[in-house]
Amino acid sequence: MNGRTEHGPDRAAAAYREVYGAAPAGVWAAPGRINLIGEHTDYNDGFVMPLALPLTTLAAASARDDGVLRLSSGDVPGSVVTLSVDALSPDARDGGSWAAYPAGVVWALREAGLPVGGADLHFDSSVPTGAGLSSSAALEVATATALDELYGLGLARPEAARLCQRAENDFVGVPCGVMDQMASACCTAGHALFLDTRDLRLRQVPLDLAAAGLRLLVVDTRVKHELGDGAYARRRASCEAGARALGVRALRDVPYESLDDALAELAGAERSGGDGAVPRRVRHVVTENRRVAEVVRRLDAGEPAAIGPLLTAGHASCRDDFEVSCAELDLVVEAANAAGALGARMTGGGFGGSAIVLVAEETAGAVAEAVGKAFAAAGHRGPRIFPALPADGARRVC
């Protein structure tokens, strides 16, 4: 779904009335996110630290009593997808359609034994697609939040996030971890979410950068290299292979202090065949978990400026060991740091999308200008740059 600037619950409700001929029962919102640190660790049972953005997907919705699910979007005007909830199945879905995401949520809720029937839903989003800001998770969580209230399901936020992840994994067919859905469901304004993705223990860590004279910028490169889910799935498979070779449940169980020994063991196995990718993937995950812990420690100590080098180190690991960066993301990091940023890194799955840049308030304009000039000099389309303000997670807004 493409980002919108004319965006709000009144607009979503009015569009719902235009499509369905009646007022909705309510309007619910779920945000996109950035990840401060902890990339590709979530499907390795690791640690992540996202924060929600003010950009949201809105779902105007009402329940139906006839088992019919109707879906419409402000990005696809004049089109209504009509489905039977009893016929929803991963085998029958169109994984290339945006409607597979909300339909998958309905399927996952019903698969969990929850009494969900039909519904009319209309979506309007300001979360840009392809920017690495979790537009799909926002769509899923907005759907789950609306259905939770419409059907009185009483879902806890982490449970809703898990079911949305199942929708994306098993219905849409994208092997994502749970971070994006947890961020959209559980974040709170003014905080980053420190999350253990194994057991979903979470802590809201205060993140008041303005009080420290800092600003966090999001740089949407506006490019998406179509390596897509196949490259994502290959990296997940490499991580699982590494865990099997090391005899652990998941890579989060490899201690940082034992990393050198683990890499030596993997290197020996790789000499019997392999391209060396597995040790690199393992090194990224283990060191990235360490970086998450260190960022939390420095924020708890009231030292937000000190996280900058950790962001840059995380980008280097994503670029060199996990190999999910691209020329445009690397250019953001290089140009921003050269212009005086405190640190910068790609955020999200990679292969395009967005980077984040930590700057002192007084240098924010100069750093943004330097990134724009670097893109122009390289012949790239100008990036979209805006501040990241930690926002609330999913909620009813009307």
Image: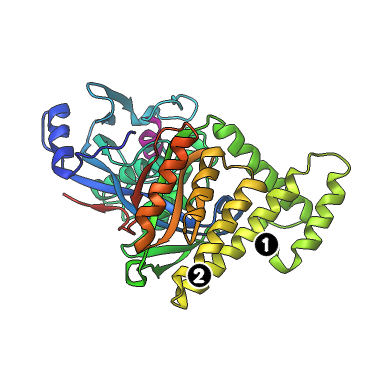
Task: Locate residue 215: give its quadrant.
Answer: bottom left
Say which quadrant the N terminus sits in: top left
Which residue position is annotated with label 1? Answer: 253
> Residue 134: image x %, image y %?
41, 44
Which tag, 1 or 2, sits closer to the chain's start?
Answer: 1
Apparent side of residue 236 relative to residue 241 in the rendered image (left or right): left
3D distance between C-alphas at marks 1 and 2:
27 Å
- Residue 375 in the image: above or below residue 317: above
Residue 306 image label: 2
- Residue 165 in the image: above or below residue 46: above
The segment highlighted magenta reads 99-105
The amino acid at mark 2 is Ala
Apparent side of residue 167 relative to residue 389 in the rendered image (left or right): right
Q: Determine whether the residue tagged by mark 1 lies in a helix, strand or loop.
A: helix
Apparent side of residue 326 relative to residue 216 in the rendered image (left or right): right
- Residue at (19%, 51%) from the top-left corner? 397
Which residue is situated farthest in the top direction here?
Answer: 78
Q: Is residue 205 magenta?
A: no
Dominant SS of magenta comes to: helix
> Residue 8: image x %, image y %?
18, 44
Task: Locate residue 11: give its quadrant.
Answer: top left
Apparent side of residue 266 relative to residue 83 in the rendered image (left or right): right
Nearest the camera: 254 or 350? 350
| Badge 1 density bin: few <14, some 14–19, many ≥20, Cα 10 Å | some
> Residue 213: image x %, image y %?
35, 69
